[in-house]
Amino acid sequence: KTSVDTDTFTIKSFERDFEIINKDIQCCGFYVIVTSDQMSAAEAYRECHKRDCVEKVFRALKSSLGMDCIGVHTADAIVGKALVWFVASILRSALFLKLTTLRKEDRKGFTVPAALDLLDEVSAYKDLNTGKYERRYSFTAKQKKIFRAVGVKEDSIDALIAGL
């Protein structure tokens, strides 16, 4: 077994100045990891980070993909719905990775939910004279950035709409 020595300190007295206490608390941060396996701090951090990523995916599945409510009555339906959730989580993760560079310029505007909301605004209508579908509105600048980030050309969206 190996041990790691760390610096410690003892507080002998204090005054309750909540402004200073709250300021100091904001500067503090540490992890306490209890494990039965011998591992370095870096290995423990990587393991916790993996778990954190998995938990975030499940939180996303529950909040935006409806995984918090199964709403089916048969075992086959549960399996089918789980498959849809699995594929959706893969697509959501892929979208998250593709939007990484855009999030650097606008952290809140290019989250996965924000991007999906923007893409959901793309709509089409059926021209009653020609019987063909056309895009209702021009793409916004943010929608264009999202399409470029995921490698989708604007013309291909119009082609999909025209093919309806």
Image (spheres, rainbow, N blue to C red):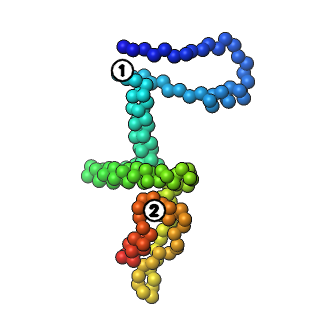
State how far apart marks 2 and 1 are (Cα).
46 Å
From the viewer's perspective, is 27 left or right of 54?
right
Residue 162's place in the image compared with 87, above or below, is below
Q: How far from the left and from the top, in percent, is residue 132?
A: 41, 82
Query: What residue lies at 42% left-to-right and 72% top-to-bottom?
Result: 155
Front of the two marks 2 and 1: 2
Q: How far from the left and from the top, in percent, is residue 91?
A: 38, 54
Q: How far from the left and from the top, in percent, is residue 16?
A: 72, 21
- Disc 1: CA contacts within 10 A as few (<14), some (14-19) or many (>=20): few
Amino acid carrying label 2: it is: Arg
Q: How far from the left and from the top, in percent, is residue 49?
A: 43, 35
Where, by quadrant of the figure, is residue 162 drawn?
Answer: bottom left
- Image mark for residue 38: 1
From the viewer's perspective, is 136 left or right of 79?
right
Where, by quadrant of the figure, is residue 11 drawn?
Answer: top right
Q: On the rendered image, what quadrant is the N terminus found in?
A: top left
The secondary structure type at the circle numbered 2 is: helix
Q: Nearer the viewer, residue 142 or 134?
A: 142
Amino acid carrying label 1: it is: Gln
Q: Write down the residue under mark 2.
A: 148
Query: What residue lies at 38% left-to-right and 50% top-to-bottom?
Result: 89
Q: Give the number of callouts.
A: 2
